[in-house]
Image: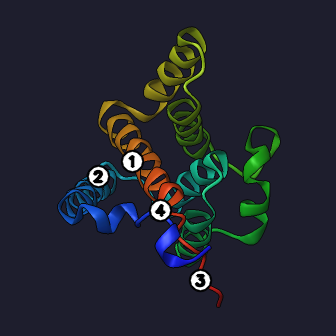
Amino acid sequence: MADTDRLPYLDRSLPEAWKALNALALKVSAAAEAAGLERETVELMNVRISQLNGCSFCLDLHTRQATEAGATLQKLAQLPAWRDSTLFDSVECAVLDVAEATTTLPDPHVRGEALTAARSLLGDETFAAVEWAAVTMNAFNRVSILSEHPVRIT
């Protein structure tokens, strides 16, 4: 397909909206850090959300960022089966529960149980930061998927 036939990159078609989304991401990242969330945990969440959404660009980016933050290749490989793995601690499991509930939006009863359990474990401040981080990551996935951002070959 010729460049003129493809849809424009969403992030470039309305730069002010893209800047606002990035500003939101910075605020959410600061809130997650202030709430005591480890960068590795946030990146594991970003990878899991990107897996669920099928966003190859974000998977590439956040897998690299997760390893830079300390995630092992074994943990990243186990991420799709995190519920059956012994590699993830209780905070990581709660964060991944929020990530999946926010991304897949299961029926309200299932979603409510998962989110209530996560909030109980994480506390209000951390839970709110995780929810916002998941919402923001989902937004970035949509921008990259709709823009058909290519994965950079390294």
**Of residues 124 and 11, which is closer to you in this image?**
11
Label 4 or label 3, whichever lies nearer to me, is 4
Q: Is residue 5 above or below residue 89?
A: below
The quadrant of the image that shows the C terminus is bottom right
Q: Is residue 48 above or below residue 113?
A: below
Amino acid at pointer 4: Ser
Q: Earlier in the sequence, mark 2 or mark 1?
A: 2
Mark 1: few/some/many CA within 10 Å (<14, 14-19, 20+): many
Q: Tag 1's secondary structure?
A: helix
According to the image, label 2 marks what residue?
28
**Of residues 33 and 63, which is closer to you in this image?**
63
Asked if marks 2 and 4 touch (Cβ < 8 Å), the reply is no
Q: Earlier in the sequence, mark 1 or mark 3?
A: 1
Residue in the picture at 40% in, 37% down: 131
Residue 57 at what x, y percent from top left? 57, 68
The quadrant of the image that shows the N terminus is bottom right
According to the image, label 3 marks what residue?
152
Q: How far is mark 4 from mark 3, CA to CA?
A: 14 Å
| Residue 123 tag number | none
